[in-house]
C-alpha cells in the first residue's frame, strides 16, 4: 500500500523549509534575478540549516512490518517543493544541493558516498553535439595506469561555476555505443578541468550555468561510478546503460518537485492579488457555476494536485526500492508541463500586474521554463513512458 504521508519529523522539516523559503529566499528573489552571477551569500546560513542535504535519497526507514515507507527520496521532493516556492534559482545555487549529489548517492559505493556525497556536486551531461540524446555523448575517458584521462566539453552545467565536484558522463569506447557510457567524479580544480564561460539566461539567474572543458584531465581510478566493464552482448549492453540511467530515476522526481514548488508560488500569489481586488476564490461551487476565471483556477489547482501526487509516488517507489523509471519520467513530464502552463496562465489572469516586475509572477514563469527542459525534455520523457508502456526498446521506438 502506498503511503505518501510524511513522518512527524519530515513534516517538521518541510514546515521549517517553507519558513526558510518565505523569509530567507523570497526577499532576495528580485535582487539576484537582476544581479546574475552574483554570489548569494545569504544562502550559506540556509545551507548550514539544511545540514548539507542533497537532492538524492538513501534507504527509507523500516516499518514494524519490515516494509519501507516515507524515506529520504520523499523528503527530498518535499524539500525541493518547499524551497522552490521561495525561489528556484536560489535553491539551485544552494551549497550541497547540486544535481550531482543525487547521482553519487544513488549509484556510488559506500566509500564514494563518504568522500563525495556531502560535497557540492554538479552534473555534466549535455554537450554541444549531444543534448537530450545522452547516449551520443563524445567526451572520452581512457584508463592510463591507475588514472582516468578525460577529454571533452560539457555545456549547460547547472551550478558548474560554484560547485566543488563534478559528475561527468563520458564514454570508454565510442564504437561500443551507450554500453560504454560511464559517470566519473571529478573534483573542481583538477588540472585539465576548466570553466570556460558562464551563460546569461532567461530564468534561474541566481544559479550559475557553465560550460566546462576537459583536456587530459586525470582523476583517480576509484572515481568511476559503477563498473569499468563494457558489455558486449545485447542484454549486457542494455543493463550497463540502464545502470547509468538509474541516476535519472533518482534525480527526475526532485527536479519535477521544483515545478510543483514554483507553480504553487504562482497560484498562491495569484489568489492573493485577486483578493486584493475583492475577488475571492472559495472552491465551494461546482465548476459549471463559476466564472471562466474561477473555472480556470479550479483546473490549474487540479493539475497541480495531479502532478504533485505523481512526483510523490515516484519518490515513494525509490524509497521502497521499486523500479520507478516510467514513473520518474511520467512525473517529470507532467510536472514540467504543468509548471509552464500554470505560471504563464497566472501571468495572464493578473494582467498588467502579472506581466510587470512589480510582482514576481513574470519571474516565476521565466524560472519554470527550464524545469521542463533539463534532466530530460518533455519529448524525451514522453518517449521513455511510451517505450515502457509498449514494451519497445530505444532502437524500436525513436
Image (cartoon, rainbow, N blue to C red):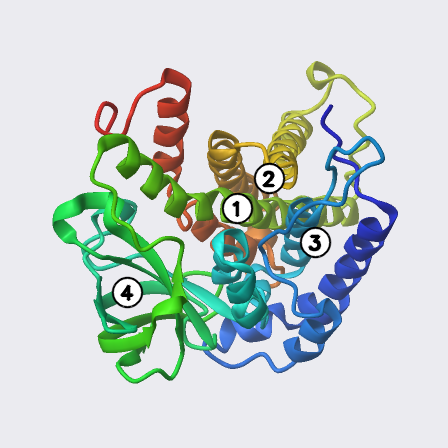
Task: State the SS at label 3.
Answer: helix
In the rendered structure, the answer to whether residue 35 lies left or right of residue 142 reads: right
Q: Is residue 55 above or below residue 345?
A: below
Viewer can see residue 303 = yes
Q: Earlier in the sequence, mark 2 or mark 1?
A: 1
Closer to the eye: label 4 or 2:
2
Q: Nearer the viewer, residue 266 or 372?
A: 372
Q: Which residue is mark 4?
A: 154
The outermost residue toward the front is 145
Closer to the eye: label 3 or 2:
2
Task: State the SS at label 1.
Answer: helix
Q: Which residue is mark 1?
A: 250
| Other-residue count near label 3 (Cα within 10 Å), few / some / many at <14 / 14–19 / ≥20 | many
Contact between marks 2 and 1 (CB within 8 A): the answer is yes
Q: Which residue is mark 2?
A: 318
How far apart marks 4 and 2 lie (CA) works out to 28 Å
Closer to the eye: label 3 or 1:
1
- Residue 72 in percent (x, y) is at 68, 50
Q: Locate the N terminus by quadrant.
A: top right
How far apart marks 3 and 4 lie (CA) works out to 30 Å
Task: State the SS at label 4.
Answer: strand
In the rendered structure, the answer to whether residue 112 lies left or right of residue 199 reads: right
Q: Earlier in the sequence, mark 4 or mark 2?
A: 4
**Residue at screen point 45% across, 48% down:** 247
The outermost residue toward the right is 8
- Residue 257 in percent (x, y) is at 60, 46
Q: Which residue is mark 3?
A: 82
**Residue at screen point 62% across, 82% down:** 41
Q: Earlier in the sequence, mark 3 or mark 1?
A: 3
Amino acid at each position: 500500500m502506498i503511503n505518501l504521508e510524511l513522518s512527524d519529523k519530515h513534516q517538521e522539516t518541510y514546515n521549517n523549509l517553507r519558513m526558510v523559503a518565505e523569509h530567507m529566499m523570497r526577499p532576495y528573489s528580485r535582487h539576484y534575478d537582476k544581479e546574475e552571477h552574483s554570489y548569494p551569500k545569504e544562502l550559506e546560513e540556509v545551507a548550514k540549516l539544511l545540514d548539507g542535504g542533497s537532492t538524492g535519497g538513501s534507504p527509507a526507514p523500516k516499518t514494524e512490518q519490515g516494509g519501507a515507507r516515507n524515506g529520504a527520496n520523499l523528503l527530498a521532493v518535499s524539500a525541493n517543493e518547499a524551497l522552490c516556492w521561495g525561489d528556484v534559482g536560489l535553491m539551485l545555487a544552494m551549497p550541497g544541493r547540486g544535481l550531482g549529489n543525487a547521482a553519487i548517492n544513488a549509484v556510488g559505493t559506500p566509500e564514494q558516498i563518504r568522500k563525495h556525497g556531502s560535497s557540492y556536486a554538479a552534473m555534466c551531461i549535455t554537450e554541444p553535439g549531444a543534448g537530450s540524446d545522452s547516449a551520443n555523448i563524445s567526451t572520452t575517458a581512457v584508463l592510463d595506469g591507475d588514472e582516468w584521462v578525460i577529454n571533452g566539453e560539457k555545456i549547460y552545467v547547472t551550478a558548474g561555476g560554484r560547485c566543488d565536484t563534478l559528475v561527468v558522463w563520458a564514454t570508454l569506447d565510442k564504437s561500443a555505443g551507450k554500453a560504454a557510457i560511464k559517470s566519473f567524479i571529478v573534483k573542481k580544480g583538477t588540472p585539465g578541468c576548466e570553466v570556460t564561460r558562464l551563460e546569461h539566461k532567461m530564468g534561474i539567474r541566481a544559479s550559475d550555468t557553465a560550460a566546462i572543458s576537459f583536456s587530459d584531465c586525470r582523476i583517480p581510478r576509484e572515481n568511476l561510478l559503477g563498473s569499468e566493464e563494457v558489455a558486449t552482448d545485447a542484454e549486457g549492453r542494455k543493463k550497463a546503460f540502464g545502470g547509468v540511467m538509474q541516476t535519472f530515476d533518482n534525480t527526475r522526481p526532485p527536479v519535477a518537485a521544483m515545478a510543483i514548488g514554483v507553480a504553487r508560488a504562482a497560484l498562491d500569489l495569484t489568489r492573493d492579488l485577486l483578493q486584493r481586488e475583492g475577488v475571492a476564490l472559495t472552491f465551494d461551487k461546482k465548476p459549471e457555476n463559476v466564472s471562466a476565471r474561477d473555472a480556470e483556477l479550479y483546473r490549474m489547482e487540479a493539475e497541480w494536485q495531479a502532478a504533485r501526487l505523481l512526483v510523490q509516488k515516484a519518490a515513494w517507489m525509490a524509497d521502497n526500492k521499486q523500479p520507478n523509471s516510467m514513473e520518474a519520467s511520467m512525473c517529470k513530464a507532467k510536472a514540467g508541463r504543468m509548471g509552464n502552463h500554470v505560471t504563464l496562465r497566472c501571468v495572464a489572469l493578473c494582467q498588467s500586474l502579472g506581466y510587470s516586475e512589480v510582482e514576481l509572477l513574470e519571474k516565476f514563469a521565466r524560472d519554470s521554463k527550464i524545469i521542463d527542459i533539463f534532466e530530460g525534455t518533455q519529448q524525451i520523457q514522453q518517449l521513455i513512458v511510451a517505450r515502457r508502456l509498449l514494451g519497445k526498446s530505444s532502437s524500436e521506438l525513436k
